[in-house]
Image (tube, rainbow, N blue to C red):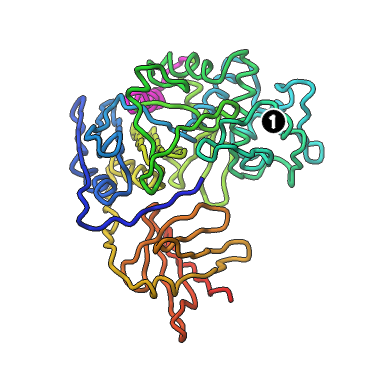
Amino acid sequence: MIHEFVLRIALSLIWVVTIATTTNAIDLKSRIDPLAEPLVKDGVVVGLIIGIVKDGETQILAFGETAKDSGKAPDGKSVYEIGSATKAFTGVLLADAVETGRVKLNEPVQKYLPERVKMLSFNDKPIALEHLATHTSGLPRLPDNMKPRDAGNPYAGYTVKRLYESLGKIKLERGPGQYEYSNLGMGLLGHVLARQAGKSYEKLIVERIAKPIGMTDTSIRLNKGQRERLALPYDAALKPQKNWDLPTLAGAGAIRSTVDDMLKFLQANLVEDDKSLSKALSAARVKHHTTPDGMAIGLGWHQAKDGLTWWHNGMTGGYTSWMSVVPNMKVGVVVLSNTATMKISELGEQVTRVACGVPVRPSAERTVVDVEPAVIESSVGVYPIAPTFALTVTLEDGKLMVQATGQDKFQVFPESKTKFFYKVVDAQITFEPGDDGKAKRLTLHQNGQNMPAARQE
């Protein structure tokens, strides 16, 4: 999927709507507005909605629109694709199947596939269900035979037959046990859990999670009423996109939901009782594996470096989601947007801190300035940051575009002749001009790190 941005002049009129709905005494609006409103005003998103639960009280804050220029603000019943946040639900399904005695975490995935389908192993070490749920299976991020006919809906044509063909050909480079994020692995987990239960993944989600919690708007296929409440999807350039369909790899990212429903899910994750589902929700948030960067992973859920916050985000072609729970503080946060941008994950982290009482400063305001075309063109080139990772800078229709190895292409915006910034993520680039006027090196500033790279001749 390719993301692009369009430069917005400072005087453009951007529709901004803010709605607050409070059920009890919680009121974080004054602290969250400065974090969320700029995303709409600066043209980063079309709209977004935030749900917070704290000590049993909830608040919903809505910004922007459900469709460009419609004037219609989102509310608790607006429907969004939650993308990879679906993986946390898939992890709960696995925990539920273990809790009810239907499967065991250490059982080979092969046990739940048709006999004719043979998964390859590494040194005779099979991939277990737990490996799929913790991204430690060794399976690649995506199957190698996924060649979408429609780039706007890339998973739609991927069939079970093609999945089985892929599993029989994948050669594992290492045995299970090392973390490597895999949509294929989580999609496969959803598939085998559905096969074991003898029903579709959607029906399994509804019966085992949504219905017991009272989530009436969480599903994959939308009814007429839900379609009418669907927030329309947009990419990072605020261009209309298609909705995504994941018929085979549903467990990786197919769920659609609302803030009202997602708040119910988060509240259920904060309950401690002896109900079977409560035990499954809790079991999915038990640390199984630690990642090299200091995070950890349970079944589907990721644990932040603080050791307290469990989270997952998601992105499809025109939506982004974030959800988090901090059980010991009785806090849960969900953010849904009908725009594909990682800025929503940054916002989700900020709102989680606010809900936990941690001071948060709004991101620095950056102003786009006019720069001569020749100055922009002087930055074009390839800048290797590491042997296998480089930034490729190109000029397209007067816009400076940057593409990192293996990632999408994004526009960067000038705040001076040498300093540029992303709108899609909190990162900046500084170019250093050489004697010939062309940039001789750049420095990528992100996550508190400064990563220099000389221009490749």
Judge whether 431 appears above or below 129 on screen.
Answer: below
> Which residue is located at x 53 percent, y 42 percent?
296
**Quadrant of the drawing holding the C terminus:** bottom right
- What kind of element bears circle 1? helix
> Which residue is located at x 59 percent, y 40 percent?
289
- Please state if 214 lies on the left or on the right of 23 as rendered: right
Judge whether 419 appears above or below 366 on screen.
Answer: below
Judge whether 86 appears above or below 450 on screen.
Answer: above
Location of residue 217 (image quadrant): top left
Magenta extent = 259-275
Looking at the rendered structure, the kind of residue marked 1 is Arg
- Please state if 126 lies on the left or on the right of 390 as rendered: right
From the image, give the main secondary structure of the stretch colored magenta: helix
Q: Nearer the viewer, residue 40 or 28?
A: 40
Location of residue 6 (image quadrant): bottom left
Q: Residue reaching furthest right?
A: 123
| Mark 1 nearby-residue class (10 Å; few <14, some 14–19, many ≥20) | some
Position in image of residue 147 (x %, y %) = 64, 39
Judge whether 53 appears above or below 421 on screen.
Answer: above
- Please state if 322 lies on the left or on the right of 176 as rendered: left
- Please state if 228 lies on the left or on the right of 211 as rendered: left
Q: Is residue 9 magenta?
A: no
Q: Is residue 274 magenta?
A: yes
Instruction: Write down the residue under mark 1.
Output: 162
Q: Nearer the viewer, residue 20 or 74?
A: 74
Position in image of residue 341 (x %, y %) = 40, 46
Location of residue 230 (image quadrant): top left
Position in image of residue 14 (x %, y %) = 22, 47
> Which residue is located at x 78 percent, y 21 percent?
115
